[in-house]
Image (cartoon, grey):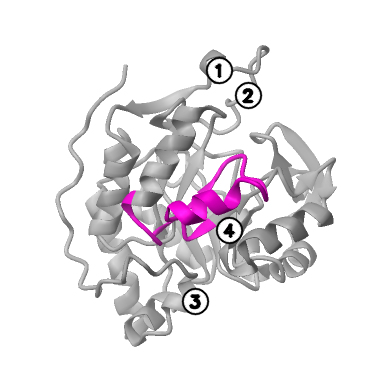
Amino acid sequence: AATVLPLPARVPTGRRDVSPASRGSLAVRAAASDDAVWSRAVQFRPCIDIHQGRVKQIVGGTLKDSADGKADSETPETNFETETSSAEFAKMYQRDGIFGGHVIMLSRDDGTTQAAMNAVSAFPGGLQVGGGVTAETAMPLIDAGASHVIVTSYVFRDGAVDQERLDAIVKAVGKERLVLDLSCRKKGDDYYVVTDRWQKWTELKVDEATMAMLASHCDEFLVHGVDVEGMKLGIDDELVRRLGRHSPIPVTYAGGARSIADLELVRGAGDAKVDITVGSALDCFGGALPYDEVVAWHNKQKELVRA
């Protein structure tokens, strides 16, 4: 059953306000001295996952297309569901100065699209949005307030990069507002990008060559470790290690984080170059890890860099 949990109390951040009108990349915002510190610090990237118009946390790999193709026929394994609106979560992240979070549309229905629009409108310039985004649908999301759009399946088609589509979405929104989602699963000794709700394998390895090639077309990478996503079983430290070693642009890892110790593990394994998303483990999503503690950890990273 859906629940309504009280959102965490305000967490003092000590971080100066950034104009809501600013919708550029983290690198652009880092032009100011205080933001320059943030550009070098590991950051917590929050999430708002939306399915059938509601905020949910879903176990990775269990979201599959229904036989009739309708969103209301889908039955993924759900960790958490709430009646609290997407906009309220967005306002909480804005209140605490947590930029660069991900709004992910997990189903293809009008209610989910509207909830995503509501979230980015509530925190202009503070959130990225993905889930079925194409060159034709990207700009309305940017116009609604998204800082970036996140794209996977549209540009990774038939097991490879569709260069024509990649060029089209770069032309539509600009390289500086594009995040490429390299969510992946391990096969043998390598990680391969998976698309279409993580149901289809591609032939694209998440390695140094791939990231170097794609980095010229986007502002950031987002990488879900699909094998551990939503399971609260700990992070895929080998994947994090490879991201820290090979990504030439900002990269965020998502999957399995359940404690402050896991956040520290990401910071160490990623050589302080990989940001971290926490979802199902947070108390605001029904988990045991206090959101306020994660925000405090996030703020501490700036002080560590300054020291």
Which amino acid is tagged 3? Answer: Ala
Q: Which one is in front in this view, the residue at disc 1 or the one at disc 4?
A: 1
Q: Is residue 123 left or right of residue 142?
A: left
How far apart are the alpha carbons under marks 4 and 2? Answer: 26 Å
**As drawn, 275 above or below 52:** below
* Mark linked to residue 74: 1
Reading the image, the residue beneath label 3 is 27
Label 1–label 2 contact, CB within 8 A: yes
Magenta region: 122-148
User: Is 133 inside the magenta-drawn segment?
Assistant: yes
Circle 4 crowding by C-alpha within 10 Å: few under 14, some 14–19, many from 20: many
- Between marks 1 and 3, how big is the CA–CA gap? 38 Å
Dot 2 corresponds to which residue? 64
Q: Earlier in the sequence, mark 3 or mark 2?
A: 3
Give the mark, 1 or 4, whose residue is nearer the N terminus: 1
Judging depth in this view, the residue of 177 and 264 nearest the camera is 177
The residue positioned 64% from the left and 34% from the top of the image is 197
Q: What's the residue type where badge 2 is placed?
A: Lys
Residue at the (60%, 58%) spot, across then down: 179
Splitting the image into 4 quarters, where does residue 222 fall? Answer: bottom right
Give the Cα distance between marks 1 and 4: 31 Å
Q: Position of residue 39 (x, y in %)?
A: 44, 76
User: Which element carries disc 4, helix, strand or loop?
Assistant: helix
Q: Pointer 4: what residue?
A: 240
- How far across and down, in percent of the image, does residue 295 sit? 28, 58
